[in-house]
Image: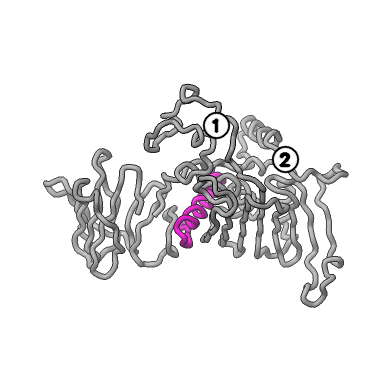
Amino acid sequence: MLSLAGISSFRLALSIASEPYQIAVRDLIRSSVLGDVTKYEIEWNYHGPRWRGRPEVKMIREQDTDWRAWLMNKTYRPFDPQLYFEYRLYKEFSSGISDQWMSHGIDLCHYFMGESFPLSVVASGGIFAWHDGRENPDTFQALFSYPKGFLVSYATSFGNDAPGFTRIMGKKATMVNHGGEGSPRWQMVEEKGNHEEDTSVDSQRAVKDLLLPGDKALPPMGIGDEDPSHMINWLDCLRSRRQPNATVHNGFSHSVACMMAARAYWSGKKAYWDPKAEAILDRTPGHSPVSAEVSVGRIGISSSTPKCKLTRPPSGCMKARYRRGINWLSYASRDAKAPHALFTDTLGGETTLLTNEQATVAATRHLRGGEFGIFSLPQNGLNS
């Protein structure tokens, strides 16, 4: 189980949403010019040991930093200049490609398609190009399914600089973006015929470059962080009191997508989003098998119906007695100085919150048909 608190360094990747060409693409897509969109592809590549080898690593000294503040809630360790500058390579401090690159692409997908959260995500990849001590993958791919009925594919390789692109595929037309992150160069390609019936069909499809009113030359294939569009939008909204192009809700939704992809990669399992509980699950929401789950603001072990009665015995242990089998085990309370564990009989009846001394070395087991299981609750969150 992956603790949401254990994933750090998610950037709000929303600045591209204020660039005029991206706004124009959004408006075109929402006018249904593409027809029903069934697939959305993003591929951005780079040839090199990305995030490794920064010259500042050999220059920085601990006294130049506030090392303890930088670590935040992470376990203290001696100052490490490589970790300080190259944190994106290490699992405890970043998810690498999924939160540093994919976040920008998946946010634009939500922006264009009017979506908020994926239904599910699978992910794969590995360290195939740069065996330099990094923990996060240098080659990564994730597949998302969305409520409106389309599939999103995101892929990155740091071992080959094949041209990046985004392709939004509808029944009437395809929007194609040439370039990597933030490129404003878009084309509309007519959907007509099939390659299987005519291998020259591409030459028969109308292609139209997207140009803003007054523009005669094609826009560049990339825009840097110095582009002022997003800052101008924010300042305008301060004056007008309107909502900006990208709100905190947009940031939350694409962060969830990135967390789901990271969890799917590290667990090797499909990750699901439960919008009602705001939880990332390893099963379809609503299914009854008991499993641990992590939610935003809630930690628990659940099956179906939340019905239980909590009582506190004189000994100080927390006990839960179920009205009807094992329906809901709430993360009721825990002394921050003394982590506890949950000990449950899955046939129903009584569940006891054990003390730290009883639970520290406890093993985790699946809670099925009469087995007993212990879930350790360390101070920094639920991990199993």
Quadrant position of residue 73: top left
Quadrant position of residue 191: bottom right
Colouring used for the render: one colour
* Nearer-the-camera pick, 289 or 163: 163
Is the residue 128 above or below the residue 134 in the image? below
Quadrant placement of the N terminus: bottom left
Is the residue 60 above or below the residue 23 in the image? above
Q: Position of residue 164 (x, y in %)?
A: 71, 52
Residue pushed farthest bottom?
A: 197
Q: Secondary structure at mark 1?
A: helix
Q: Is residue 138 magenta?
A: no
Identify the residue under disc 1. 57
User: How many marks overall?
Assistant: 2
Q: Residue at x 51, y 39 (%)?
A: 87
Q: Which residues are magenta?
A: 247-274
| Residue 237 seen in the current view | yes
Residue pushed farthest right?
A: 216
Q: Is residue 265 magenta?
A: yes
Identify the residue under disc 2. 223
Disc 1 crowd, CA 10 A, few/some/many (<14, 14-19, 20+): some
* Nearer-the-camera pick, 35 or 382: 382
Magenta stretch secondary structure, dominant: helix
Task: Select label 2 or label 1 by which is in front.
Answer: 1
Q: Amino acid at mark 2?
A: Ile
Q: Position of residue 114 (x, y in %)?
A: 62, 54
Q: Residue at x 23, y 50 (%)?
A: 359
| Residue 119 seen in the current view | no
Disc 2 crowd, CA 10 A, few/some/many (<14, 14-19, 20+): some
CA–CA distance between discs 2 and 1?
Answer: 28 Å
